[in-house]
Amino acid sequence: MKTLKIGLFGFGCVGQGLYHTLQHSTGFKTRIEKIVVKNREKLRPIGQEFFSYDKNDILENSDINVVIELIDDAEEAYKIVSTALKNGKNVVTANKKMLALHLETLLALAKENSVSLLYEAAACGSIPIIRTLEEYFDNEELSRISGIFNGTTNYILTKLASENLEFAAALKKAQELGFAESNPESDVEAFDPLYKTIILALHGFGTILKPEQLLRFGITTLKKGDLDFASKNNFKIKLVPSIQRLSENRLSAYVIPKFIPKEHHLAKVDNEFNGVIVEGQFSGEQFFVGRGAGSLPTGAAVLSDISALSFSYSYENKKLRQLQQPTFSDELKINIYVSSSKAADLEIFPFEETFEDFKKNGFYYRTGKIGLAEIKQLETVVRTRKIFVAEIFEQH
Ligand SMILES: NC(=O)c1ccc[n+]([C@@H]2O[C@H](COP(=O)([O-])OP(=O)(O)OC[C@H]3O[C@@H](n4cnc5c(N)ncnc54)[C@H](OP(=O)(O)O)[C@@H]3O)[C@@H](O)[C@H]2O)c1
């Protein structure tokens, strides 16, 4: 077992959670050599001697063999992580945005420099989904990965439905509890689950997706009428990313709010919890549930990566190395619900089939079947007009 000498970037919610979990772990030998943070004025809960404001105190320190990157700035994180890999240091990161935007380059850098880049905490907090996909489902062909990948929006949706809280109040509570990203737009506009979808597509299917390929709708346009539709139909609203194999060599991926029957196991995943459904060709459906955000659960996922590093673990990206990987396609038809305060807004959607049309007191919705590619073309106008779009659950 290697002794790990750690250089830690960031001492916020996750950094402090990791520090706490490390203090209570006896399974492996580690020492935090230095912690680099940004703000010189901030009071720190541990001795000032640990801290530095100069990244080279870690990156150029030859004693440090592991860099843990836990800052909230994806571009700076990319500079830190790529330099660390080039300098021959193993890296653990929780930064899904940085990973999703630079996946190919970072994988290549880790390979060229024969070091590990691990990031279990970057997808679904404490649920060990990346290593499960890497190690257990390394061979079986998957048909779908879907679920609830964002703790903040799940917390907000839970509070909106169960406590009648206003959106802003529910978001504020999520921020106070440390679930939300520093910039909550990343959560509520569904960038965060989109980044996680990209990470899971790599490990589950061997496909490297680009953010702009994926349809992405968040929850900011959700209205009272949509909550009423959910309750009238015995649904809960969840923000559900989905990666679905369409054929041997094609897959679709998108992130969208979804109406799910209340009795479905995913609908029972509330508050900051995340749930991941993995459907294998032979194994059928597996369901993983756990805390998707928060200081200690996320710290625990980082801790697990550090422990894995002490046994020289690295991802082998076995699905990426298979002969053929499915490529992105948006030739999927889904059942959707669209709502607005203007009747004309519903007319822009080229439904192939309409199931229901509703209008009452200046609130309009329509449900029906539509192609993913057709909705993707409307993405900008849907956002500008603040139309709420959600998928409706279908039994497979
Ligand atoms: N919070 C969660 O539940 C959660 C869950 C999964 C993944 N993550 C990911 O974990 C990472 C950290 O999130 P967080 O919630 O811990 O953020 P946070 O509480 O806002 O803390 C961010 C930390 O990064 C430091 N920092 C920012 N820019 C820096 C720079 N240029 N150089 C050095 N340090 C810098 C800050 O320094 P100062 O202390 O000086 O301000 C602070 O200590 C993010 O990538 C996030 O997406 C978070």
Image (spheres, rainbow, N blue to C red):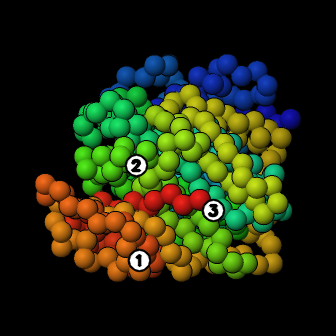
114 and 330: which is toward the camera: 330
Q: Are marks 2 and 3 in contact (CB under 8 Å)?
A: no
Decide: is 345 above or below 270: below
Q: Residue at x 59, y 64 (%)?
A: 243
Task: Estimate the spatial distance between the alpha carbons at disc 3 and disc 1, rounded to whole Å.
Answer: 19 Å
Residue picked out by circle 3: 396
What amino acid is found at the position of numbered circle 3 in the picture?
Answer: His
Q: Secondary structure at mark 2?
A: loop
Residue picked out by circle 2: 233
Badge 1 local density, few (<14 within 10 Å), some, or many (20+)?
A: few
The image shows residue 42 at horizontal and vertical percentages of: 35, 27
What amino acid is found at the position of numbered circle 2 in the picture?
Answer: Asn
Give the number of the disc on residue 261: none
The image shows residue 187 at horizontal and vertical percentages of: 40, 49
Respond yes or no on whether mark 3 lies under 8 Å from ligand 1. no
Q: Residue at x 72, y 52 (%)?
A: 285
| Quarter occupied by residue 113 | bottom right
Task: Estimate the spatial distance between the alpha carbons at disc 1 and disc 2, rounded to whole Å.
Answer: 20 Å
**Mark closer to the observer (2, 3):** 2
Residue picked out by circle 1: 353
| Quarter occupied by residue 323 | bottom right
The image shows residue 176 at horizontal and vertical percentages of: 35, 29
Task: Answer yes or no: is residue 146 visible.
Answer: yes
| Sooner in the amino-acid sequence: mark 1 or mark 2 | 2
Q: Are marks 1 and 2 in contact (CB under 8 Å)?
A: no
Badge 3 local density, few (<14 within 10 Å), some, or many (20+)?
A: few
The image shows residue 186 at horizontal and vertical percentages of: 38, 52
| Sooner in the amino-acid sequence: mark 3 or mark 1 | 1
Badge 2 local density, few (<14 within 10 Å), some, or many (20+)?
A: few
Task: Estimate the spatial distance between the alpha carbons at disc 2 and disc 3, rounded to whole Å.
Answer: 19 Å
Decide: is 151 above or below 78: above
What amino acid is found at the position of numbered circle 1 in the picture?
Answer: Glu
